Amino acid sequence: MHEETERPFANPYDSNKEAGIYVCIVSGAPLFSSSDKFDSGTGWPSFTKPIDARLISKPIDRSYGMVRVEVRSAPGDSHLGHVFYDGPNPTNLRYCMNSAAMRFIPKDKMEEEGYGDFLWVIAEK
């Protein structure tokens, strides 16, 4: 909520490989799919794209003497992380997120937690 960043490699979702979705901890909005998650080597969970770009906002962040693109949950108005232009195909984007700003819903719990309409975003492997 206060534009803070958790320590790398010391968060629950960086190494999570389970199928499911990541939702905003404040609003419950569905943000990212495990199908778009990749190991960026940064220590934070990283994704190539959001589930629905309308559910995030991307203001410019000029803190700490840098110019970056912040990622916020639009419905929850909470800081999620930043987006960088060094990700893999197909988007070449790296949405570098804070685990503390999200809650993971495993694929087998999505229906009972009210996210059944989003099962289609989980690719079959």
Image (spheres, grey):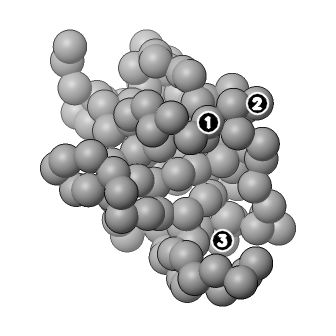
User: Could you give the CA–CA distance between mark 1 and mark 3, rounded to whole angstroms?
Assistant: 24 Å
In this rendering, the answer to whether 113 lies above or below 98 is: above
Dots 2, 3 in contact, CB < 8 A: no
| Sequence-first tag of 2 and 3 | 2
Q: Which mark is residue 17?
A: none
In this rendering, the answer to whether 19 lies above or below 48 is: above
Residue under label 2, please give it. Answer: 10
Residue under label 1, please give it. Answer: 43
Assign a secondary structure to mark 2.
Answer: loop
Residue nearest the observer in this picture, 27 or 58: 58
User: Could you give the CA–CA distance between mark 1 and mark 2, rounded to whole angstroms?
Assistant: 7 Å
> Image point 80% across, 61% down: which residue?
4
Q: Is residue 51 left or right of residue 30?
A: left
Say which amino acid is labelled 2: Ala
Q: Residues within 10 Å of mark 3 (few under 14, many from 20)?
A: some
Residue 112 in picture, x, y percent from top left: 50, 22
Dots 1, 2 in contact, CB < 8 A: yes
Q: Residues within 10 Å of mark 1 (few under 14, many from 20)?
A: some
Residue under label 3, please give it. Answer: 77
Residue nearest the observer in this picture, 48 or 92: 92
- Quarter of the image holding residue 103? top right
Residue 98 in picture, x, y percent from top left: 66, 47
Say which amino acid is labelled 3: Asp
> Image point 36% across, 57% down: which residue?
86
Residue 115 in picture, x, y percent from top left: 43, 35
> Image point 27% across, 46% down: which residue?
88
Q: Nearer the viewer, mark 1 or mark 3?
A: 1
Q: Is residue 88 left or right of residue 67?
A: left
Q: Nearer the viewer, mark 2 or mark 3?
A: 2
Residue 16 in picture, x, y percent from top left: 54, 21
